[in-house]
Image: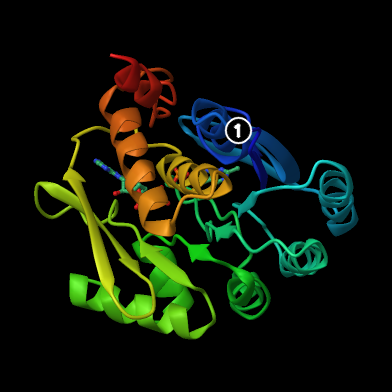
Amino acid sequence: MVYKALTIAGSDSGGGAGIQADLKTFQELRVFGMSALTAVTAQNTLGVQGVYPLSPEAVAQQIESVGTDLGADAVKTGMLFSAEIIEVVASKVKQFGWERLVVDPVMIAKGGAPLLQEEAVSALKTHLLPLSMVVTPNIPEAEALTGLTIRTIEDRKEAAKRLHELGVKYVVIKGGHDDDGEETVDVLYDGSEFFYFTSKRIDTKHTHGTGCTFAAAITAELAKGKTVQEAVQTAKSFIQAAISHELGIGHGHGPTNHWAYREKQAR
Ligand SMILES: Nc1ncnc2c1ncn2[C@@H]1O[C@H](COP(=O)(O)OP(=O)(O)O)[C@@H](O)[C@H]1O
Ligand SMILES: Cc1ncc(COP(=O)(O)OP(=O)(O)O)c(N)n1
C-alpha cells in the first residue's frame, strides 16, 4: 500500500523547517510526500533573510494538480503567509473533501521573522481551523489564536478548549516554549479528555524546524490510517530522536536530525 501526504507550506532553503522538513519526515515514515509551495524563504540556521510569497493562484493550481491526479490520504499546512492564501487553501480542502487535515499555525520563526501576516490570524480561525482534524500550535501561537496568556498547564487546557470550540476536532498545544523543568509536555484535547505526551527536555540550541517536523509526523501517521493519539505518540518519539541526535550543522540554531528515528528503530 502506498500512503500519500500533501504539505502546503513555505520553502526553507536551509532544509530544517517548512516543506523540506515535511517531505523528509514523510519519507522517513514511509509515506509518499507531495507539496504545494506558498512562499520561498531565504533562510538558514542564523535566521530568515528573505520571504517571497507566491500568488494565491499559484498555490491553488499546485493543490489542484495534486488533488485531481494523485490524491492525498492526509494533508498538512504550515507557513501560509496571507489571508488570501488561507482562503484558497480552505476552498481546495473543501473541494477535495480532505478530512485528515493537520494545521500547524506557523506565525513567527524562532529567530523572530514573521511568516504569517498579522491580519491573517483571523482568516486562519474563520476559514481553516473549522476544517481541520488536528491543530498544533506552540504556546505563543495558542496565545495569538485565543487571546489568552499561557503560563501553566491549566492555561493550556483552557486554550485547547477555546480552539476546539472553533471546530477543530483535536488540539495539540506543544510545550517546547515552556522551558521550566526537566520535561517537555504536549497536551492533546479531543473535546472531552486531555492526554499528555511527555519527554525529557533536551538542552540544545539545535531545534530549528521542530514544530514542522512534529506536525509532519502526525500527518504521515494519519495518512496510514492511525488514530490521532497513535499519530501524536509516534510524532513525539520522532521529534525526540530528531532533537537528541543533533547534526550540529550551520552557525546558529541548527536543524533536527530527520533520519534519527529510523536508525533508532533499526537498531
Ligand atoms: N528542547 C526540547 N527537548 C525535547 N523536546 C522538545 C524540545 N523543544 C521542542 N520539543 C518538542 O518539539 C515539538 C515542537 O515543539 P515546539 O518547539 O513548541 O514547536 P515550534 O517549533 O512550533 O515552536 C514538541 O513535541 C515539543 O515537545
Ligand atoms: C518556511 C518555514 N516554515 C515554517 C517555519 C517555522 O518552523 P518551526 O518548525 O516552527 O521552526 P522554527 O522556525 O521555530 O525553528 C520556518 N522557519 N520556515
Can you say whether 167 is above or below 180 in the image?
Answer: below
| Of residues 142 and 27, the one drawn nearer to the viewer in this rendering | 27
Q: Which residue reaches farthest front? A: 1
Circle 1 SS class? helix
Quadrant in which the C terminus is drawn: top left
- Decide which of 202, 112 is in the foreground and name it: 202
Q: Residue at x 44, y 26 (%)?
A: 258
Q: Percent x, y for residue 211?
A: 43, 47
> What residue is drawn where x is 32% and y is 48%?
233
Residue 194 on image: x %, y %: 27, 71
- Residue behind mark 1: 23
Q: Amino acid at mark 1?
A: Leu
What coloring was used for the rendering? rainbow
Count of residue discs:
1
Name the foreground residue: 24 vs 118: 24
Crowd class of label 1 (few under 14; some 14 to 19; many from 20; radius 10 Å): many
Give the quarter of the figure containing the N terminus: top right
Residue at 19 percent across and 44 percent down: it is 199
* Image spot of residue 44 (x, y percent): 53, 29
